Image (tube, rainbow, N blue to C red):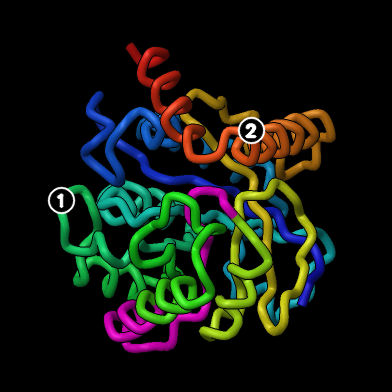
Amino acid sequence: MTQRVITLLYHDVISGTDSDVSGFCGANPAEYKLSVDEFESHLRAISSALEGQVATPGDISRLTFTTPPVLLSFDDGGVSAYEQIAPMLETCGWRGCFFITTDRIDTPAFISREQIKELHQRGHVIGSHSCSHPKKMSECSKEELLDEWQRSLAILTDIIGERVDVASVPGGYYSRMIAKAAAESGVKMLFTSEPVQRIEFVDSCAVVGRFSIKRGMGPVVPVEFIQGNPVRRFRQYAYWNLKKAAKAVSGPVYPWIRSLYLSRKQA
């Protein structure tokens, strides 16, 4: 397995002005939802920057790369995964990694069982984003973590008819215990929100970082992540660690403060 990988973290892609039509509602999730035009411009820029194809987790496990492979991942399981994102990726000849919050399957603004099955049949990777999308997964007990991973993996395996063994951590709250529970549940590759290239192993599970993409980021941003721009990567790494410290200091009030700030910013 290659030791470095560049994974871009997207969420939803929406047409129109209503950000609640796909995925989770509210100001905080809206910050990560790109317009169709924004996402299209990103794909064009990524295509121009890539030396080869976009990779999948399976490629990382079995192939050798001369440069770090690039993956495109999409969290939450909003309906735009099926309606917008997958068709746009397929136009480029690419496939994405879609991480599904299984408690939300077949609910408004989220993907359905049939859509998940079809995405898999079209060559996209289906993974778990937990069952309930805990607000702070790092505070869950081991029993709760095992339940989140095992139930969600079982549901997705049943839907696509093949074993699901990839997952991503919701909310950016990662801990080593989360990875150990994921490994015990059968996850072979776990994606976090830490903006790093390196792959680390916790038991039998490969832990992979990702570079987050937000609404308003121009197409130059994913290209700079791919090309290894040190300033761009340092900015996100510094911001991620600052936010991590803020979460630790402010505790349970952090989500409330952030939501209030983003609501006023959006207004």
97 relative position to 212: left or right: left
Q: Visible in this render: residue 43? A: yes
Of 75 and 122, the residue lying toward us: 75
Circle 2 Cα neighbour tier, 10 Å, few/some/many (<14 / 14–19 / ≥20): few
What residue is rendered at 80% in x and 41% in y? 228
Left or right for 158, reference 29: left
Location of residue 33 in the rendering, given as x and y in whole percent from the top left corner: 39, 35
Q: In the structure shown, which secondary structural element does the residue marked by tag 1 occupy?
A: loop
Label for residue 108? 1
Per the rendered image, the range of residues in magenta is 153-173
- Residue 184 image position (x, y, % from top left): 58, 85
Upstream in the sequence, badge 2 or badge 1? 1
Horizontal relation, residue 3 to residue 35: left or right: right
Frontmost residue, 189 versus 221: 189
Q: Residue at x 30, y 36 (%)?
A: 14
Nearest the eye: 229 or 197: 197
Which residue shows up at 27% across the image and 64% down it?
103
Q: Amino acid at mark 1?
A: Pro
Magenta includes 57?
A: no
Question: Residue 45 location in percent, x, y?
Answer: 59, 36
Left or right of residue 219, residue 105 in this image: left
Q: Which mark is residue 246?
A: 2
User: Residue 258, how many percent across, how many down?
Assistant: 47, 27
Q: Local crowd at mark 1 within 10 Å, few (<14), some, or many (≥20)? A: some
State whether residue 41 is above or below residue 11: above
